[in-house]
Structure formats: structure tokens, C-alpha cells
Image (cartoon, rainbow, N blue to C red):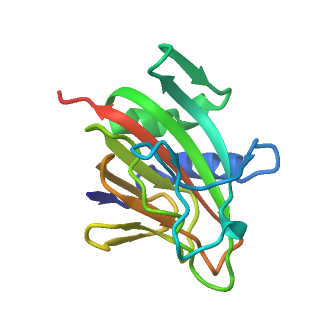
Amino acid sequence: MEVIDNFLPEDVFVPIQETMLGPDFPWYYNDFIAYDPSEKRMFIPPEKDSWNDFQFIHNFYKLNKEYGYQEICGYLELIQPILKKLKMFCLLRCKANLTTCTPDGHIISGYHCDYEYNCTTAVYYLTTNNGYTIFKDTEEKVESVANRLVKFNSMRNHSGVSCTDEKIRAVINFNYIENIR
């Protein structure tokens, strides 16, 4: 796992943050948070009910391995500075997640791995709050700090954890094959 603070220069980060958290950016309701590809189903951990199991998402990009086509949204240009800095060989998926505050306490959204094969996940934090990403194997926590990026193997079980001190927690998830050159 690698944590990189101040991943982008401030003058590059702020327009991304302002656009994505502004009134005109399209977020879409999703009736669950965690999906485990190895289980081929959504995952609801036993410690929570489905009342808080929702989020708002924005799919930037998805490579569909079954049909060989790419789904691309109109905002892909917005995240180009992140894509360039990650130096990837092949982008598999890019999706933003926005969860709302859970003032009664932190909620672990559900441990999951992003892919069943060896690739990289990068989580880019758009907001600072007391939510975090937690890893099942070590219980390590990466705090939600705006303009921070954490990279790890996509097969590693992890979970997003809600915030209790701000209205929202927003991240962008990248799944990709790294360029080894």
C-alpha cells in the first residue's frame, strides 16, 4: 500500500473538487455500497442494516470484458490529470462514490475486493472528514484527506467507512493495470 498526500498541485485539485461537488455534476443514486466480484453479489455486512446501505455514484469509465466495449461519460477529461499521474497501462474502471454523513456513528460499508485478478486500485479523496478506508487483513486505516491518494492491490479486501463530522465523504476509485516501464 502506498499513501500519497497532495497528489495533485492545488491549482489542479481545486477545479476537480469544485466541479464534482458543485450543483451541476451528475451523481446517481445506487441502492447498495459494496459489491464483491468474487461473490457476484452485493455485500451487506452483518453489523448494519440496509437503511444506510446506499450511495451516490458517477461512472467515469468501465471496460466491459464480456463485450469488449468501453463506457465513457462526458466528464472523463476532468480527471485526466489523475490518470496521467498514475501512469497506467490500461484503465479498467473509474467510479466516484459519494456517501452521506452517519451522525450516529461510523458505518463500515462492507469488505470487498475490487477485482479477482492482479491489478491496482487507487482511491483519490475529494473531501476531508473523519471517514476512512480500512483494510481487512491488517486493520490499517487511511483517513479521508482531500487530495490524498492510496494505491493497493485490487484483490485486497477493504471497505469505505462513513463520516460523522461532515455532510459527505467523496472519493474517486480507479482500477487499472500498471505500466511496468
Name the residue nearer the viewer: 103 or 4. Answer: 103
Q: Residue furthest top?
A: 68
Picture quadrant where residue 129 is located:
bottom right
Tell me what residue is drawn at x 41 percent, y 29 percent: 91
- Residue 119 rendering spot, x and y as whole percentages: 29, 38
Residue nearer the viewer, 167 or 41: 41
Residue at the left extreme?
181
Which corner quadrant of the image does residue 107 belong to? bottom right
* x 33%, y 67%: residue: 136
Q: Position of residue 6 (x, y in %)?
A: 41, 58
Q: Is residue 106 above or below residue 17?
A: below
**Quadrant location of the N terminus?**
bottom left
Q: Nearer the viewer, residue 120 or 64?
A: 64
Say left or right for 138 vs 174. left
Q: Report the side of 160 relative to 15 (left or right).
A: left
* Spot occupied by residue 103 in the image (x, y as percentages of width and height): 69, 82
Q: Residue at x 47, y 13 (%)?
A: 68
The total number of labels drawn is 0
| 7 on left or right of 107 | left
Viewport quadrant of the C terminus = top left
Q: Is residue 60 above or below residue 110?
A: above
In the rendered image, the residue lying farthest to the bottom is: 104
Residue shown at 54% from the left, 37% from the top: 79
Give the vertical position of 53 relative to 177 (above or below).
Answer: below
Residue 72 at what x, y percent from top left? 60, 24
